[in-house]
Amino acid sequence: MVISNRISRLMENSSWIRAMFEEGERLKKAYGAENVFDFTLGNPITEPPKELKKEICDLLSRETSGMHRYMSNSGYEEVREQIAAFHRENSRLPFTGSHIIMTVGSAGAINVTLKALLDPGDEVIVLSPFFVEFMFYIENHGGVMKLVETREDFHIDVDAVEKAITERTKAIILNSPNNPTGVVYHEKEIRELAAILEKKRGEGQRIFIISDEAYRKIVYDNVTLPDAFNLYADTVAVFSHSKDLGLAGERIGYIAVSPRIDDQGLIDAMIFANRILGFINAPALMQRLVGRYQKNSVDVADYRQRRNAIYSILVEAGFNVKLPEGTFYIFPKSPIVDDVELIRVMLEHRILAVPGVGFGRKGYFRIAYCVEMDVIEKSRQAFLEVGALFR
Amino acid sequence: MIVSDSMNRLVADQEGWTRKMFEAAIQMRKEYGPENIYDFSLGNPDIEPPHELRKKLIDTICDPALGTHRYMQNNGYEEVRDEIAAYLSERTGLPFRSRHVFMSIGCAGAINILFKSMLNQGDEVILPNPFFWEFKNYVENFGGIPKFVETQDDFQLDIGAIEEAITDKTKVLLLNSPNNPTGAVYTKESLEQVAALLYKERKKGREIYLVADEAYRKIIYGEEPLPELFNIYDLVISATSHSKDLALPGERIGYLAISPNIPEVDLLVSGLMIAIRALGFVNAPALFQRVVAEFQRNSVSVADYQKKRDILYGTLMEAGFECVKPMGAFYMFPKSPLPDEVDFVFRMQQEERILVVPGRGFGRKGYFRIAYCVPMETIRKALPGFLRAGKHYIGR
């Protein structure tokens, strides 16, 4: 067989995604794409800021030579300096360009980080429900994923984390604002977690927090994202400009290694990993652009409007659901235990969503509401019909 | 220790001389000024993308449609793959369709997702030596085992040696022609012999894929066009990048072309779809996908590279170096006049301010690599240094 056994297993495990995708395509053909409510994809609707678009145009219109060549594997120095300045200001820690590594999105960033950290058999704690790619990333590098359930409200169950730590534990991935739940972790719970990890450090075991902050700019109301670097010394944060600058397809992100990690070896290993994993460097042109847009944000108002709309519809339809504090996902409880069955029923009403089992949590489902407002409004009737079935 | 043992071993693998050389080079640039250092160590071409491509880039970016920068299918835009498939069909006469093309983050990304999709723990990949060192990492990233097979004296394939290296675990033969570091271009005859060998092995139940790294395919100097692997063997997957032909190395854009003769193409594509996500590439950069589609037939000015090759090669001969004349890419791989080539490379650095790379960085001690993708002026200024080194170390 042309493909490896491992990939073949992964394909079998995700065969339901394909089945769903195909059913969705069938529905779109049958009823017209505008009459199918597709909430499956986290493909942000944000367009890059106008100034960024203008700048990229100006940049290319000028005659500059060498702008598409290789650069250092960690990225352009001046761009890393700009990003470091942003984090210096944010966290009041002495970030320099050498703490920043430009990467192929945050997916690339996490792979690079794990490649640098993990030996075969090392464990990485992931809080469930979770973005299923984390499992791929950990297994790529011979690591073992240890899932720890979050509490009923999807916040960190610190005791459960403590129980899950073994002597092989090397890192814990935190993803806040969270995909799929939309939860933003509070400063208090991260501090409690940090206290446990610091205790381990006292016993001679270093456990890293890998803070996936891909959605950091999409938070609502008065919620603020705590600064992970100040809450725990051994923090490596990964960022992407997919969501905040609307550049998902361009694959641009970075790693920020806390200046409180006193080890140049880690940074060197990450730069090396960037090379040998085949990324080589983050795309050149996009690097030049994003340096100056660290403080930019998406128009959260657009997403808030959509969040409020979908939340009201779900509540009206009788779903048990928590109001998300960030991201563009909402994670309602399924009225029946079998979430895949619920998804099948919703399909009949032309709603496409992802079952919770795809995020390690049965009995829930995920709606990605980064869609046109119109789609949300038109889906109301369908949600009400589905809700009525299970009343 | 923070960094994993596995990673430390990889770093240590090359730490010694690379680090030392790199630091010495930085020191020298400071001391003499970068313009007085003749750096032949990097495969980073000094050329610019074609004028029309730059224009296309500006048009695409200055008047973007909504959604230009969003995610697309993991294998890339359908219309881009269509256009590339049309080019491949025209080139090979085979029925390439969009599903046979998989857009990637450069050639390096292409080979990594391919190996992730194909290799089981312990599967063997045959690599003709000397070789681009990263191949070893790419194979080992996924638990594969690189099997090195020496090439002949002229760096052409040694078919007998390849035959001996084949086992039941062999899954892939990786060919890189035009070759980095030697500049060799494999002849049509030798590739046909490889194909005959692999068909013979198939009768024994061994299904071996030819993976071709064709990053330098447009840079060849001979009269003959590059032999078309797709027409020579059936189980061929080629990886290409637009780093060299369109001078876009920093933008990380390339693709895999899967032979329409591979029966399990759909299965392979499904595997690649997962692999590109799992490895964190997700998709090839959106903007540059759109830009490169219509430039498949474009090329760099091979004449410029050929002029550089001729001048440098002529000087090496005059100086008494032993070197196989390169027929492609922008590298040459002369024999070191000193048995320890690292020693020689350091002396070139210190005495002539010429930076080259020791052969052991490519699996072959006693040689060194010159990357001549540098401005002509750099070459001209370095020529006396090569001549002096010849006089001194070879003794003419």
Image (cartoon, coloured by chain):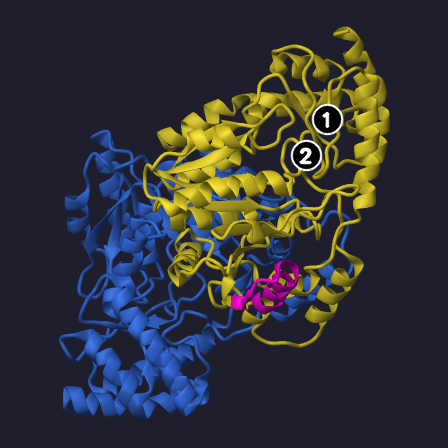
Which span is picked out in magenta?
Answer: A80-97
Label 1 CA crowd tier, 10 Å (few <14, some 14–19, many 20+): some
Which of the two residues, A153 or A83, is positioned nearer the viewer here?
A153
Residue occupied by mark 2: A182
Instruction: State whether residue B30 is above or below residue A235.
Output: below
Q: Position of residue A239 (x, y in %)?
A: 59, 51
Residue A84 is inside the magenta segment:
yes
Residue occupied by mark 1: A322
Q: Is residue A333 visible?
A: yes
- Chain A's colour is yellow
Q: Position of residue B62 (x, y in %)?
A: 76, 62
Question: What kind of secondary structure does the magenta stretch mostly adopt?
Answer: helix
Q: Amino acid at mark 1?
A: Lys
Q: Amino acid at mark 2?
A: Gly
Q: Is residue B95 visible?
A: no
Q: Is residue A13 left or right of residue B79?
A: left
